[in-house]
Amino acid sequence: MSICSTAAPHDSPVALKPLGVRVSTFANLLGIGLTKAWGLCRDKKVETFEIDGCTIVFYPSIERLVEEQRQQKNNQPQALRAGLREATEASLASRARRQRRTRPVAAQTRGA
């Protein structure tokens, strides 16, 4: 059963969101792998329940997870950039040290 089949009919003016989706559909919606999706369920990052052995993820909890991730991203760009700048400077300094240590190979001549 797809997400569309759980929503309102196509001729309906109002499209309904599903109440819940299977873990595989949840993974596809977010573009993540099944292992990551199951990990999010295990870590209680999304709300789940079971029906006849099928784990269902509440759709509102998926939206909440996405919104939390979006807000975290918007709140931390400066810190990430600072860390990137420091890492780049350290990498360049390391490269410069390696280049200074490297000695040019002297031309070897054979004795007659």
Image (cartoon, rainbow, N blue to C red):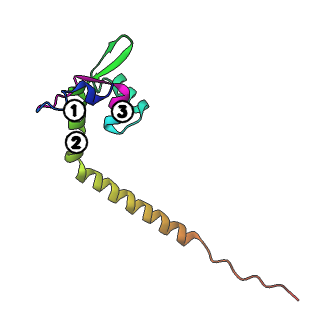
Residue occupied by mark 2: 70
Q: Distance between the residues labelled 2 and 3?
A: 17 Å
- The magenta-colored residue range is 14-27
The label shown at residue 63 is: 1
89 or 65: which is nearer to us? 65
- Which tag, 1 or 3, sits closer to the chain's start? 3
Front label number (1 vs 2): 1
9 vs 95: above or below: above
73 vs 95: above or below: above
Q: How far apart are marks 1 and 2 (CA)?
A: 11 Å
- Which tag, 1 or 2, sits closer to the chain's start? 1
Q: What is the secondary structure assignment of the residue under circle 2?
A: helix
Location of residue 9 (image quadrant): top left
Percent x, y of residue 86: 35, 58
57 or 2: which is nearer to us? 2
Outermost residue on the bottom side: it is 112
The label shown at residue 27 is: 3
67 vs 42: above or below: below
Q: Of the residues shown, which amino acid type is indicated by label 1?
A: Glu
Residue contact at pointers 2 and 3, CB within 8 angstroms: no
Query: Mark 3: few, some, or many residues within 10 Å (few <14, many ≥20)?
Result: some
Q: Is residue 77 magenta?
A: no
Q: Of the residues shown, which amino acid type is indicated by label 3?
A: Ala
The label shown at residue 48 is: none
Q: Of the residues shown, which amino acid type is indicated by label 2?
A: Arg
Percent x, y of residue 12: 13, 30
- Which tag, 2 or 3, sits closer to the chain's start? 3
